[in-house]
Image: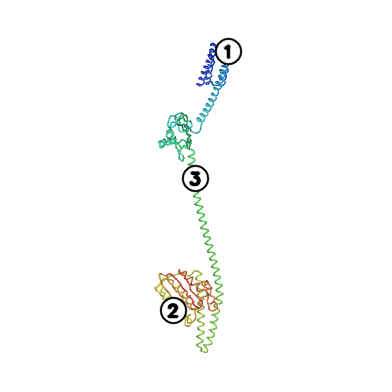
């Protein structure tokens, strides 16, 4: 309203000036050309509200200039007077176009200003304008409402009025640092920002800063957004993430538990399968063992039993004739056959107990000399004519071993030495005890073992090629010896050459 009244006063003044110049132009002589006085009216036309009024002023002043020439006494030709006034008329129109251009620029500025005010006033986002010293120059309604202030109440206050007290002192330094290197950026990158409302309460905010300069004055526009909903959402999302993490952990643990159970069940099934396979293998081996036993028994038992039957019949005949020499001869044949049968049965019984897992190790304090002497006494009847037995021992006599298993090992090795050695050959046993280790060697001067057979020497039912057709046996003795030695944590070895004899050794722990 005030602006309209001001424009009206200037419009009246313009037309008064036009009237005055017109009257003066009529009254003064022609050589006093005051027509350029209309330009003052044109310059004041910048305060007109409408561009059409400016154009009207140009038309009116041009017309009045020409009218004056017609009315005034003509002391010169009309064409000359019109030519003289042409520059003035052109200047009127130039001034008019200048004023119109100015009015257009002003309208654009007013339009831009109106748009800015509308944007500033109606923006949902809070907007603050502060100068270099941190004083609030402008604040839109949204930011005033956000912080609980009345319209215009923030203007003139320091920006720190909106910052919690615990951060306010540090913010002054941050503000100074920002003005040293001003650039558009979010405020408090990576931090949670809080603003202070008029009542002292705090709210989470998000702030973006944008510096600018007007006439050497520095300003900063701050765009402030209420972050409460976002923070609540973040807390809600964080809580959901934690719940999902807990659920995921529970599912992971459940999955691991199921995998462990599956693995355990798989292992149990695998173990059961292996046990079943082992049982089947053992059953198959036992079947094969029985089959081979039947086959061997039918062969190995036939000869000694035939010998016993034959010798017993001959003894009866020789008894009637009182032929003592032949009776002793056939009695010895019976004894030898029975010993052979006993050896076969003993080896088969030992193998059966091993395969069925009925053999256990029971170490006890034992005198090595007495043990070997007992074995000698047991096998005395097996010695061939002229065969001798020698035992040499070094080291301690008392040892801690399973006497029964050791005795069976020695019986097998010594009986083999007797069986595969000729009459009159020596059988030597050497024993030694050193540093908790027992070493026993059985040495003979028998037929020896062919080199090509030695790699199979400890296999079940294996017999050397040079003994198959000459000497009775099952091929189980050395296999049993090796199993017994391994059960006691020991080992078995040998050295042998054909026609030179063999040396078998057993190393045991004491």
Task: Report, in whole angstroms, how far the alpha carbon at label 1 lies from the one at label 3.
Answer: 94 Å
**Earlier sequence position, callout 2 versus callout 1:** 1
Q: Position of residue 216 (x, y in %)?
A: 46, 30
Toward the viewer: 6 or 142? 6
* Vertical arrangement, residue 438 with respect to residue 213, above or below: below
* Vertical arrangement, residue 250 with respect to residue 89, above or below: below
Q: Position of residue 200 (x, y in %)?
A: 42, 34
Q: Nearer the viewer, mark 2 or mark 1?
A: 1
What secondary structure is found at the residue carrying circle 3?
A: helix
* Vertical arrangement, residue 60 with respect to residue 409, above or below: above
Residue designated by label 1: 69
Task: Report, in whole angstroms, how far the alpha carbon at label 2 lies from the one at label 3.
Answer: 88 Å
**Earlier sequence position, callout 2 versus callout 3:** 3
Residue designated by label 2: 390
At 58% from the left and 11% from the top, the residue drawn is 76
**Quadrant location of residue 439?**
bottom left
Q: How crowded is the residue under tag 3: few (<14 C-alpha within 10 Å), some, or many (20+)?
A: some
Q: Nearer the viewer, mark 1 or mark 3?
A: 1
What secondary structure is found at the residue carrying circle 2?
A: strand
From where the camera sits, is residue 241 visible?
yes
Q: Position of residue 285 (x, y in %)?
A: 54, 69
Toward the viewer: 182 or 221? 182
Q: Nearer the viewer, mark 2 or mark 3?
A: 2
Task: Report, in whole angstroms, how far the alpha carbon at label 2 lies from the one at label 1.
Answer: 173 Å
**Earlier sequence position, callout 1 versus callout 3:** 1
Residue designated by label 3: 241
Q: How crowded is the residue under tag 1: few (<14 C-alpha within 10 Å), some, or many (20+)?
A: some
Quarter of the C terminus within the rendering: bottom left
Toward the viewer: 54 or 469? 54
* Vertical arrangement, residue 7 with respect to residue 458, above or below: above
């Amino acid at each position: 309203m005030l602006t309209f009244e001001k424009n009206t006063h200037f419009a009246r003044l313009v037309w008064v000036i036009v009237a005055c110049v017109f009257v003066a132009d009529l009254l003064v002589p022609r050589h006093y050309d005051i027509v350029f006085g209309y330009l003052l009216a044109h310059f004041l036309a910048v305060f007109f509200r409408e561009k059409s009024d400016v154009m009207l002023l140009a038309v009116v002043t041009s017309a009045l200039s020409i009218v004056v020439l017609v009315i005034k006494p003509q002391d010169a030709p009309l064409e000359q007077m019109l030519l003289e006034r042409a520059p003035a008329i052109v200047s009127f129109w130039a001034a008019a176009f200048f004023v119109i251009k100015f009015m257009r620029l002003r309208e654009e500025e007013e339009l831009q200003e109106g748009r800015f005010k509308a944007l500033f006033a109606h923006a949902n986002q809070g907007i603050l304008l502060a100068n270099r010293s941190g004083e609030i120059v402008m604040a839109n309604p949204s930011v005033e409402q956000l912080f609980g202030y009345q319209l215009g109440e923030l203007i003139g206050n320091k920006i720190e009025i909106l910052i919690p007290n615990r951060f306010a002192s540090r913010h002054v330094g941050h503000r100074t640092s920002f003005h040293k290197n001003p650039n558009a950026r979010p405020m408090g990158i990576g931090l949670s920002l809080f603003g202070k409302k008029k009542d002292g309460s705090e709210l989470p905010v998000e702030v973006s800063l944008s510096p600018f300069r007007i006439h050497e004055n520095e300003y900063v526009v701050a765009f402030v957004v209420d972050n409460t909903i976002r923070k609540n959402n973040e807390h809600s999302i964080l809580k959901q993430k934690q719940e999902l993490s807990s659920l995921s952990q529970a599912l992971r643990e459940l999955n691991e538990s199921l995998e462990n159970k599956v693995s355990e069940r798989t292992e149990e099934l695998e173990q059961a399968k292996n046990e079943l396979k082992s049982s089947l293998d053992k059953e198959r081996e036992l079947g094969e063992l029985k089959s081979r036993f039947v086959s061997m028994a039918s062969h190995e038992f036939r000869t000694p039993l035939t010998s016993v039957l034959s010798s017993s019949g001959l003894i009866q005949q020789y008894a009637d004739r009182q032929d003592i020499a032949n009776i002793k001869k056939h009695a010895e044949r019976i004894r030898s056959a029975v010993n052979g049968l006993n050896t076969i049965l003993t080896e088969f019984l030992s193998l059966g107990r091993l395969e069925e897992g009925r053999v256990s190790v029971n170490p006890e304090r034992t005198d090595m000399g007495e043990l070997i002497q007992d074995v000698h006494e047991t096998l005395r009847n097996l010695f061939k004519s002229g065969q001798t037995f020698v035992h040499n021992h070094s080291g301690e006599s008392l040892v801690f071993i399973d006497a029964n298993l050791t005795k069976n090992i020695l019986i097998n090795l010594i009986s083999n030495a007797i069986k595969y050695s000729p009459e009159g050959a020596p059988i030597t046993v050497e024993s030694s005890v050193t540093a908790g280790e027992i070493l026993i060697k059985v040495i003979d001067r028998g037929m020896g073992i062919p080199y090509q057979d030695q790699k199979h020497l400890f296999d079940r039912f294996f017999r050397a090629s040079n003994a198959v057709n000459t000497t009775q046996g099952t091929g189980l003795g050395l296999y049993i010896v090796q199993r017994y030695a391994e059960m006691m944590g020991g080992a078995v070895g040998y050295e042998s050459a054909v026609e030179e004899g063999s040396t078998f050794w057993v190393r045991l722990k004491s």
